[in-house]
Image (spheres, rainbow, N blue to C red):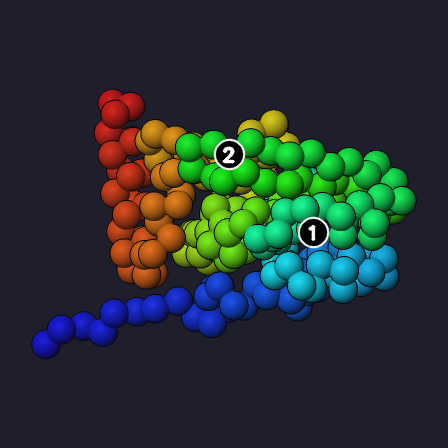
Amino acid sequence: MNQPVMDWPESLMPDAFRGLDVLRSVSARGQKAAGLLLQHGIWNELAGFDPVVAGTFPINLDIVGSDVDILCYCPDVDGFEARVQTSFGYLDGFGLHHRPATQHVGSAIVVRFVLDDLPVEIFATGKPSQSQFGFRHMLVEARLIALLGERFASDIRQLKRGGVKTEPAFARLLKLGGDPYIALDGLYELGPDALRDRVMAAINKGLRRQF
């Protein structure tokens, strides 16, 4: 008889990360970040652009100096730029630039500013927020932490404190070859059992290469 295929719990499905509930509940720093986004009206101003907090904060991998990363969907680039210039241009450290398209990511508007002592970065493209690389990576990372535990998360934070970016840190610990951003994205569609098997196979392969 075939065994049932296990799926992820609701807390590790994409829609769990909509809104600010996860950010509020993940840590004291996350709770502070959510409060600042609401207090300064950031979340309300972005409501029409499918905002999603991604990056390290929602999965408790942030370290001192980490940005709060917000992904947005802006099919009307000029309209989005005008909106953020008007709404956020007065904020400390405000800056806006157009990021050219790369092989895997379309052109984007990147907006930065500081709320109190908290740096915020908005990354807006013509692709729905939950389809963007940044969101897919975060969800894979959240699932990996759920599978591998807090000690693994602590090792990721330690690498980040040493200057390693998040995706390369995961790839290093998991012995993932090639471009770490592409490697993580390739894990997005896997269920719990398949992800665990893939990760353990990569780790074992990496260990064999050392001997």
Q: Position of residue 110 (x, y in %)?
A: 66, 39
**Vertical placement of 189 versus 120: above or below?**
below
- The C terminus lies in quadrant: top left
Q: Residue at x 68, y 46 (%)?
A: 78
**Vertical placement of 25 versus 54: above or below?**
below
Q: Residues within 10 Å of mark 1 (few under 14, many from 20)?
A: few
Q: Secondary structure at mark 2?
A: loop
Q: Position of residue 103 (x, y in %)?
A: 42, 32
Location of residue 1 by image quarter: bottom left
Q: Which residue is mark 1?
A: 79
Q: Are marks 2 and 1 in contact (CB under 8 Å)?
A: no
Q: Residues within 10 Å of mark 2 (few under 14, many from 20)?
A: few
Q: Could you tell whether 18 is left or right of 43 in the image?
A: left
Alpha carbon distance from label 2 to label 1? 19 Å
Q: Which residue is mark 2?
A: 101
Q: Residue furthest top?
A: 211
Location of residue 66 by image quarter: top right
Given residues 145 and 184, the one toward you in this image is 184
Q: Could you tell whether 115 is left or right of 159 in the image?
A: right
Q: Which mark is residue 55?
A: none
Q: Nearer the viewer, mark 2 or mark 1?
A: 1
Q: Secondary structure at mark 1?
A: helix
Location of residue 38 by image quarter: bottom right
Q: Residue at x 47, y 72 (%)?
A: 10
Going by the numbered disc 1, the residue's amino acid type is Gly
Q: Residue at x 54, y 49 (%)?
A: 126
Going by the numbered disc 2, the residue's amino acid type is Ala
Whichever of callouts 2 and 1 sits on the residue coming sooner in the sequence is 1
